[in-house]
Image (cartoon, rainbow, N blue to C red):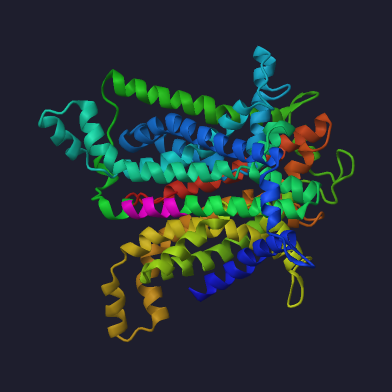
Amino acid sequence: MAVPLVFFGLFFAYPVAAIVGRGLKTDTGWQFGRIGEVLSRPDIADVLWFTTWQALASTVLTLLIALPGAYVFARFEFPGKQLLRAVVTVPFVLPTVVVGTAFLALLGRGGLLDETAGVRLDTTVWAILLAHVFFNYAVIVRTVGGLWAQLDPRQEEAARVLGAGRFAAWRRVTLPALAPAVAAASLMVFLFTFSSFGVVLILGGPAYSTLEVEVYRQTAQLLDLSTAAVLTMVQFAAIGAILALHAWTVRRRETALRLVDPGRTAHRPRGWAQRTLLGGVLLTIGLLIVAPLAVLVERSFDTPGGYGIGFYRALQDAGAGGGTFLVPPLEAIWNSLQYALAATAIALVIGGLAAAALTRRGGRFVRGFDAMLMLPLGVSAVTVGFGFLITLDEPPLDLRTSWILVPLAQALVGVPFVVRTMLPVLRAVDGRLREAAAVLGASPLRAWREVDLPLVRRALLIAAGFAFAVSLGEFGATVFIARPDQPTLPVAVARLLGRAGELNYGQAMALSTILMLVCAVSLLVLERLRPDKTSGEF
């Protein structure tokens, strides 16, 4: 546990604390009165109110749209199910800047909806809510659907034999079993939308601002570190409360259920009602998830001279749109792959050690450590990135010009996925096997290699895939710390979108499409590795 604690202390707690200290501490001491001054400002109250209600609305909307999908993936067998599960997961690992770009291509000026119906939804809250549903659909499908597939349907059938109606049997048998998973998934969606950054920045325009966007604006544009520090503390407190609730609901789910093999519960849809439900879910996925991605691809080929690969060819030229880039945008792909591989290696080491420690120890301290590992998913990545710049700038940790800074920031986001993927599998390993190996003279390292590794190898590969995908898409911290001559894919997309001109827009679409394809291939591989007998949390 010592290594993960040192890693999080050094590369997460220290930069965040430094930002807060830089904002609230002056030569005369701490200025805690500043907290009340900032929170009483009407513009900040508006930001807090919008952050909260849009997160609530996004969570409710996501539940309403994704729960039927969770049921269909859990209980129906149909052609292309594995491929479709990977497709709905693609948005979750896409960088928010690409999600924003895809919705701009669909709902924005000159987008498909504008061209066909004369309707624009960008700079409206509807675009933000729809993008959040698009982004988080997979959270509900994978978390709730994974558990739903393992609930024994015979319990509900027994209730019906005893006279309960279909709805009553579902409400009294299935719903109570699913409730903790639904609550946990809802809290994760609320967490992701509460800290939404790229989607709101691109689709909301100046009229809408979440806490994360406001931290970025106060830090990077207004240089008001004191206000940014107060907002970071508010966000930190909110995220802590959400994660504590999430940990409690996850513990309830782990201890209250008896699960069965998902292969025994899924069947081909029977009757018109089930076929209609399947058709409705497929239509929803087509309109909500496939359409934005398809429009993104279509726009990447829609050049001024007709459909072609002109925008892709232009990616090879440095400064093709005006000379802002120091390297060709295509080089950003190579940079992203190198950074993501390094971040994956770090996340696997830190996350694997943390998961092993959580498996073998218990108590309040360990539960607190478990919740701490999830904090990077909710705390402002902008704060972490800026904190890196002001804390890791002097010996013995002068990393400002080092390439490792980006993988370290990306690994912070990858570790929670590694832990949540590895933990259920490690807990399922019979401890008596390790004891038998020890009795036979095996060292702890050899016992791990001979006993644990063969059993967790598949989960390890899945964890590596998720860490790689989320590292590839990390944007909030990377935009601060990536060197101008070594941009990552999301940073290059954001730079292109920030510049006027059809060529820049087309190149942004082409880069986003490439990033989407890399993520999709990674997820398809993950689906083939996915164990059939575990629900997992992602």
Indicate whether 181 appears above or below 396: above
Query: Residue 95 placed where, x, y %?
Result: 63, 44
Indicate whether 422 appears above or below 95: below
| Rendered image quadrant of residue 103 | top right
Query: Residue 163 placed where, x, y %?
Result: 11, 28
| Rendered image quadrant of residue 147 | top left
Q: Which sits in the foreground, 226 or 106?
A: 226
Q: Residue furthest right?
A: 323
Q: Is residue 338 visible?
A: no
394 sits left or right of 173 in the view: right
> In the rendered picture of this protein, how many numbered marks are placed on residues?
0
Q: Residue at x 42, y 43 (%)?
A: 142
Indicate whether 450 appears above or below 347: below
Query: Residue 408 placed where, x, y %?
Result: 64, 63
485 sits left or right of 10 in the view: right
Q: Residue at x 73, y 68 (%)?
A: 392
In the image, is residue 42 part of the stretch drawn in magenta?
A: no
Q: Residue at x 10, y 32 (%)?
A: 162
Q: Is residue 17 visible?
A: yes
Q: Which sits in the foreground, 113 or 266?
A: 113
- The magenta stretch is 244-252
Query: Residue 429 placed where, x, y %?
Result: 32, 66
Q: Residue furthest left?
A: 162
* Magenta stretch, main secondary structure class: helix
Q: Residue furthest bottom?
A: 441
Q: Residue at x 56, y 51 (%)?
A: 378
Indicate whether 18 appears above or below 198: below
368 sits left or right of 478 in the view: left
70 sits left or right of 18 in the view: left
